[in-house]
Amino acid sequence: MTSDADERLREAFRLVSRGERAGLEQIWAEYSRPLHNYAFALTGSQEEADDVLGEVMATIAAQGRKLARVREPRAYLFAAVRNRAWARKRKGAFRARLGGQQETVSDRPLDDDYAVRQAVIALPAEQREVVVLHIWGGLTFEEAGRVLGISPNTAASRYRYALEKLRRLMADGSDE
Amino acid sequence: MGATSDDGLEARLRAASLSAPGCGLDDALRRGKAARARQEWVGLARLAAAAAVVWLLSVAVGAAVDRSIGVIHGVGRGVVVAAGESGKPSPCGVLSIVWRRRQVEEMALEDWGCDWQPQGDTPVRPERDGRRGSVEPVGPRRMGWREGGRAYV
């Protein structure tokens, strides 16, 4: 799946580098949701995630020929989201809404999406990033490690810790 | 739901929707371009602000130096009032330090009755006429060791 997805994305990058809109559409169709998920995990806000995604797409559209030289397009996309989110955070464009969550999973027992979202948000930032990149982004631990600047083993162990915590959080939430 | 296996938990996570884009590609691009343009303007504004701060600092340093040497500026024109106006527009910033110092020195010398040009009793190196060694040495001549002076090696 990974190599096929990489190849499709590389082709989309080639199209974008030639100025063809079809490339952008292809990237949007396949990656808008995973990238948005990752942006949401970083910012804790749907609106901020929309802004980050918009900036990333505009940056990709403006890259031109440089895109054709990208070796790992999927890691590149997620790294772009991460960079944009951190740049916005540095400039104070948004306040990190994560970490200080007062609301717990059991506060509002609505649907499963909500429970999952709250459990993911309750994770420590470094574990949350690995989970989102692996589960919703479809990245391998090696790719996730490259995006985060850590080794694949570190990414894998963070993922294991995150799963344990998620299991606990979601069990607590569904028991009540 | 109780304890879940890793596979079950992963499947549950994958099935859930964490978030979704709130707009289409065109809106996202429009939004992103606007944000990039805003960032460029903010960058330019910061650059301009930094340049203004540097300019203000240089003016402040110039004024501090002037004050330290007793120069008072007239309001509006920035000319030296205490020592008399020169009639020239005053440069501002760091360059003004050199120009004003020189002006003050000139006026101080005039006050003391000194001239800018060397006086008659000041040893002046005469012009060479093109021949090597044609010019008499200026100032007291050193004596060689044969003449009872120190030997210079």
Image (cartoon, coloured by chain):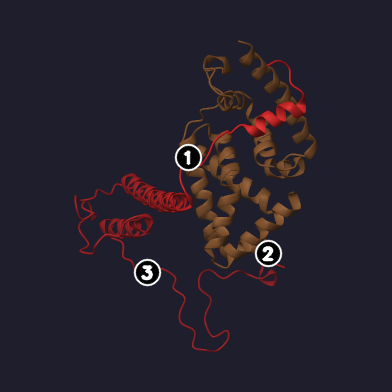
Q: What is the three-letter code of the residue carrying label 3?
A: Pro
The residue that mark 2 highlights is: B150
| Left or right of residue B50, residue A63 in this image | right
For the residues tagged 1 and 3, is the chain the same?
no
Element under label 3? loop
For label 3, the crowd category at 10 Å Cα-Cα, with few meaning under 14, some 14 to 19 and many 20 or more, is few
- What chain does badge 3 belong to? B
| Colour that chain A carries in the picture | brown
> Which residue is pictured at 21% across the width and 52% down the height?
B81
Q: Quadrant of residue B104?
A: bottom left
Of all residues, the one furthest to the top in this rendering is A176
Q: Nearer the viewer, residue B15 or B60?
A: B15
Residue B14: where, in percent of width, then height?
66, 34
Q: Relative to residue B35, is residue B89 depicted above or below?
A: below
Mark nearer the viewer, 1 or 3:
1
Residue type at mark 2 is Arg
Q: CA distance from mark 1 to mark 2?
A: 74 Å
Label 1 lies in what chain?
A
Could you say which disc has been placed on residue A91 in the image?
1
Quadrant containing the C terminus of chain A in the rendered view? top right
Q: Colour of chain B?
A: red
Residue A139 falls left or right of residue A109:
right
User: Please, is residue A168 above or below residue A64 in the view?
Assistant: above
| Real-space Cα separation, disc 3 to disc 2, in angstroms | 32 Å
Residue A32 place in picture, x, y as percent: 56, 46
Quadrant in which residue B5 is drawn: top right
Instruction: Locate residue A141, reporting x and y percent.
Output: 76, 40
Direction from residue A162 to residue B81 in the image, left or right = left
Front position among marks 1 and 2: 1
* Residue that numbered label 3 is attached to: B118
Q: Is residue A46 in view from this perspective?
A: yes
